[in-house]
Image: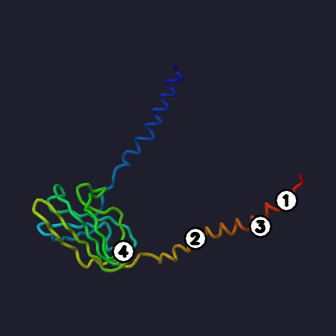
Amino acid sequence: MRVLRTLAAIFGVTLLTLLLPATPASAVTPVTVVHTEHVKAGPYDVTLGFSVWPLRAMKSLDFTFTPDGGIAGKSGKLVLDGPGFKGGHEVEPLVRHPRERDDWGLDVRAFDAPGTYRIGFEIDGPAGHGAGALENLTVLDQPGPPIAASWVVCALPVLGLIALFAIAWRRVRPGRMAAAAPL
């Protein structure tokens, strides 16, 4: 009986030691908005928040879209136009940002190509239908080296490992050794 109590106490202390430090780590970090733009979409004023500024191609960032008065009772579409989209544009519904539940937004999104983009809105709400856009949003070149150069540098260790295995295989020659061994 005493052993069972000791084991239960050890299990309880271990469980608390594992779970208590995890609670602050599991908290959702809010989006840090470093730049904002304001757009008039019919009767609605929309604030666009960017987690990175200036924008660069192939660099992930968060977008938040906040209409005055909040998103309650409103719905809408997001229209993205620019060189990084197939067919030149992309249309999707405005949805809550996963980490900023009081705003619409895009989480961890990147523009695929540098150039000039347009972010448009179509909002339906109590004040009626509204449409507006942020025009001439410039996306700069990708930071760092070109992707092909990055892949070549990353592939060198793998190619070296394959060469090492090929050399070791040729030296050992497992097929020849099995054939030469007496039965």
Looking at the rendered structure, which numbered label has been put on residue 86?
Answer: 4
Q: Nearer the viewer, mark 4 or mark 2?
A: 4
In this picture, residue 122 sits left or right of residue 175? left
Mark 1 packing: few (<14 Cα in 10 Å), some, or many (20+)?
Answer: few
Q: Residue at x 32, y 69 (%)?
A: 52
Whole-angstrom CA distance, mark 4 to mark 2, is 29 Å
Say whether disc 1 or disc 2 marks the residue closer to the N-terminus.
2
Say whether disc 4 or disc 3 marks the residue closer to the N-terminus.
4
Tag 3's secondary structure? helix
Whole-angstrom CA distance, mark 4 to mark 3, is 48 Å
Mark 2 packing: few (<14 Cα in 10 Å), some, or many (20+)?
Answer: few
Tag 2's secondary structure? helix
In which quarter of the view is residue 17 placed? top left
* Residue type marked 1: Ala
* Residue type marked 4: Lys
Dot 1 and dot 3 residues touching (CB under 8 Å): no
In this picture, residue 27 sits left or right of residue 156? left
Check disc 3 and report the residue beneath it: 170
In which quarter of the view is residue 34 placed? bottom left
Q: Residue at x 77, y 67 (%)?
A: 170
Whole-angstrom CA distance, mark 1 to mark 4, is 58 Å
Check disc 2 and report the residue beneath it: 155
Looking at the rendered structure, which numbered label has been put on residue 57?
Answer: none
Q: Nearer the viewer, mark 1 or mark 2?
A: 1
Check disc 1 and report the residue beneath it: 179
